[in-house]
Image (tube, rainbow, N blue to C red):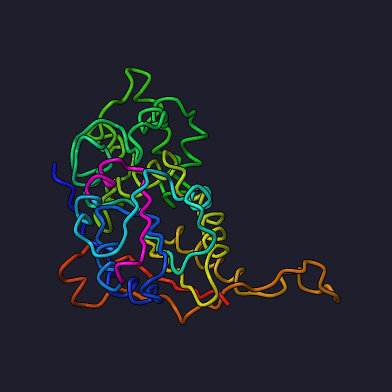
Amino acid sequence: MEFHHVSVLQAEIVHAVAGDPTGIYVDCTLGGGGHSRALAELLAPTGTIIGLDRDKNAVAAASERMKDAACRFIPVQRNFKDMGAVLDELDIERIDGVMFDLGVSSYQLDTPERGFSYQHDGPLDMRMDTEAKRSAYDVVNTYDEAGLYRVIRDYGEERWARRIARFIVAARREKPLERTGELVRIIKQAVPAAARKDGPHPAKRTFQAIRIEVNEELSILRNAFETAAGRLKRGGHMGIITFHSLEDRIAKQTLKRLATDCICPPGIPVCTCNHQAVLKIEGKGIVPSAAELAANPRARSAKLRVGTRI
């Protein structure tokens, strides 16, 4: 399948992050290269974009899309948690801007063989890095009931997490679960009929939870944001697009911490943390326009937060 991904809040994040047209920028979630390509249009030939993605198909697609960009483009197949190491390897100390577009791409969702979607039958995979060892198959078939419950509750905020975990464990006693379609059927059996009438697809939250667990999506965010802020030049910008409350909570809390001088517990008369603010938060979260939502319903939960290095 051709790599296709509709970049969300593209103009908003690019214009929020862009500064010096000769500067160095990092796209931490390269995807199909939509944000990088839009940013490249604002840069001079001496400008540089470093694109990171753990998905080799994304790196290949973005490299093709960026081949005639006027600026320099450096694609790297790495997780954005390694951004600091990548910059060190490239002998780059400071950058002018950085973008994060979190979550799963349209290509990954729409390719059944990748196993991300509850709407298409495919293997239980969900790995953003197809060479990673742990897949959704491993989570579904090897985690005990308590572990499955924790994942579905914490990362899916699923009301019926306990029942879903119990039903999964009961089903796999007969044989391992191998397909997304099998998992969807079990989830539908676990979620009471009355609860399935309204709201999102009954498997949506569980699939999100398993995907987050497989790819360690939340555990790497705080350190990645702090690393990015630490590598920005004074006046450089960081833009973060989130797609659900768990991501957005971490982004909001981390930006607030980075924009606060003292983080000592309330009531301490003298500051002992010696923490200094490194960012200024730019306004409130930006959401997609009505026109973008009409053109791309998948953008409905997106939110952009921006910080500037001080």
Q: Quadrant location of residue 167?
A: top left
Of all residues shown, which one is farthest toward the right? 269
Residue 143 image offset from top left, x and y in percent: 47, 29
Closest to the observer, 89 or 143: 89
**As drawn, 100 above or below 13:** above
Q: Residue 268's quadrant in the figure?
A: bottom right
Which residue is depicted at the point 48% across and 31% down?
145
| Percent position of residue 83, x then y | 48, 52
- Residue drawn at x 42%, y 41% is 215
Q: Residue at 43%, 61% (x, y): give it.
A: 245
* 27 is higher (above) or lower (below) than 58: below
Residue found at the very far front of the displayed protein: 46
The magenta stretch spans residue 54: yes
Give the position of the N terminus as an image quadrant: top left
Question: Where is the C terminus found, in terms of image quarters?
Answer: bottom right
Q: Is residue 71 magenta?
A: no
**Image check: 239 left or right of 200?**
right
Observer-nearest of 99 and 233:
233
Total numbered badges shown on the rendered structure: 0
Q: In this view, does 288 lie to the left or right of 212?
A: left
Residues drawn in magenta: 44-61
Q: Where is residue 113 in the image (x, y as percent from the top left)?
A: 21, 34
